Amino acid sequence: MEELQSALGNRGLTVSNLPEKGRCIFTTEDFYPGEVIISQEPYVCVPKNSIADHKCDACFESSNLKKCSGCKIVYYCSSTCQKSEWKLHRLECEAFSKLPIEFRHQITPPIRLTIRLHCRSKLQSQKTIPTSAMDNYDLVKALVAHMSKIDDEQRWLYAQMANLVSLILQWPDINKKEVAENFSKMVFNAHTIYDSGLKHLGKGLYPVISIMNHSCLPNSILVFEGRSAVLRAVQHIPKGAEVLTSYIDLVGSTVTRQKALKEQYLFTCTCPRCIKVGQYDDIHESAFLEGYRCTHNECDGLLLCNSDDNGFICQQCGRLKSKKEIQEVESKIKSLQEKARIAAESASSYITYQEVIALYKAIETLQRQLFNPCCIYLIPTWEGIIENSMKLEDWSEALAYCRLTIAVYQRVYRNFQSFHPSLGLQYYTCGKLEGVLGEAENAVKSLTKAVDILQITYGTSTPFMKDLFSMLEEQREIEALINGTDY
């Protein structure tokens, strides 16, 4: 703990213990929007692989991949990446190589992540690989497992998974109870690793980052540069303040966020947003984001559940809409969503992309009948239309729906001071599409907004941001040529 305190002290941070929260990280100096608070390499991580999509185990790249000749499970993009991972992979490779070929493909990411955790711990205890104040197994030991809070069925599952890990590794001194607890620790502490476009790349355990507590009004945001976790300030964090990040997607009502936190992390958030639950403003905000709307005689009022809980009353015209009426439309939407999901997974031609778009538009029509115009449930539908329109090179259609999505994100992330990467990435996509369509003036506006947001969350030196700066400069040059002005 003293070594960690010293390492964090050099970064303007300190670890404290609060009775109601446990371990927390506070600042010992001021941080300002865009500044890196802390960065950490993963103690262990694994890529998200599928039958059709494999990634390098070291850098998560997807090109020039070759299987490890020993275990035939792990992929590398180069000999450099393979060498960088060899000390750790050697132990698991030896274990995997003893398994029947048909069984190796059933090793799931959680199983492999836990195996790698124990392999790394063993190598560090043997001093085969180094340790540091921010890279040692004691930090993993200090993470919460919540074994007393989870149900018997979940504990039984972790015990069975621990048995499987023991069978794979075949170490005589392995502690199965410790392995089971580590499975639980992974559930509550591991982070999903995303690329700059928020595409899911894998899972990683970052023991120091995991000390940060949650808030639905966070003052920092976690992003990834390759496998490195980077926490940046998104507002001024004064000296002596707690560093707070978000464990969940902040899109959603207070009730939705609270439900997600309770189910995934076993706590109830009491941040400034959440303590307003049930108050008038919170109820109306929730109804706007997730609720239903009245369509009686072109009325566009919000529907709120009536006191008898048998329907929803329009707050504008007073009409009651029955639960049955709503459930019928929701059932149709769910059916079409499943058809769209299946169609999108197999789409590979002009005709099938058109069919997928038609399904998404049918969903959109029903959703617009049921929900408010800025309801968050429309976002996945619009994103489906955008993605498939771009595959068809229908840039105008993709741009129209991208602009609709921006309008919703602006409302959703207004509590985040508009520094959320999802909003920035929508402006980025919008600017790219406007550039393709020759709308240089609009492209400059959109890409400028993207830069303003994403340089706070992503910094300025990543390859993605350099490409964004270059794209903005190119559109400014085109705009100047069109207008006949100097650039």
Image: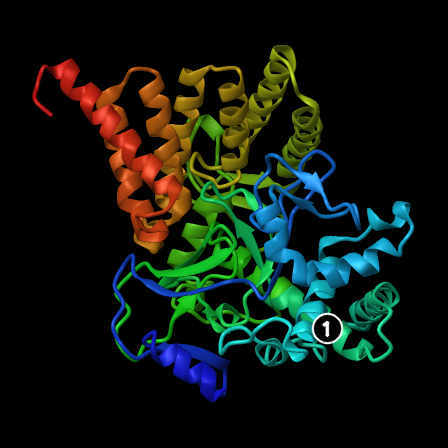
- Residue that numbered label 1 is attached to: 150
**Residue at the image position 29 percent from the left and 57 percent from the top:** 34
Badge 1 crowding class, 10 Å Cα cut-off, few under 14, some 14 to 19, many 20 or more, is: few
Q: Nearer the viewer, residue 212 or 329?
A: 212
Q: Quadrant of the C terminus?
A: top left
- Figure quadrant of residue 332: top right
Residue 346 point in image, percent of width and height: 70, 24
**Residue at the image position 35 percent from the left and 18 percent from the top:** 436
Q: Nearer the viewer, residue 126 or 157?
A: 126
Element at label 1: loop
Residue 352 point in image, percent of width and height: 65, 15
Residue 353 point in image, percent of width and height: 60, 17
Residue 62 shows up from this direction: yes
Residue 305 shows up from this direction: no
Q: Nearer the viewer, residue 83 or 74?
A: 83
Q: Nearer the viewer, residue 145 or 461?
A: 461
In-image side of 425 versus 200 (left or right): left
Classify 273 as above or below 320.
below
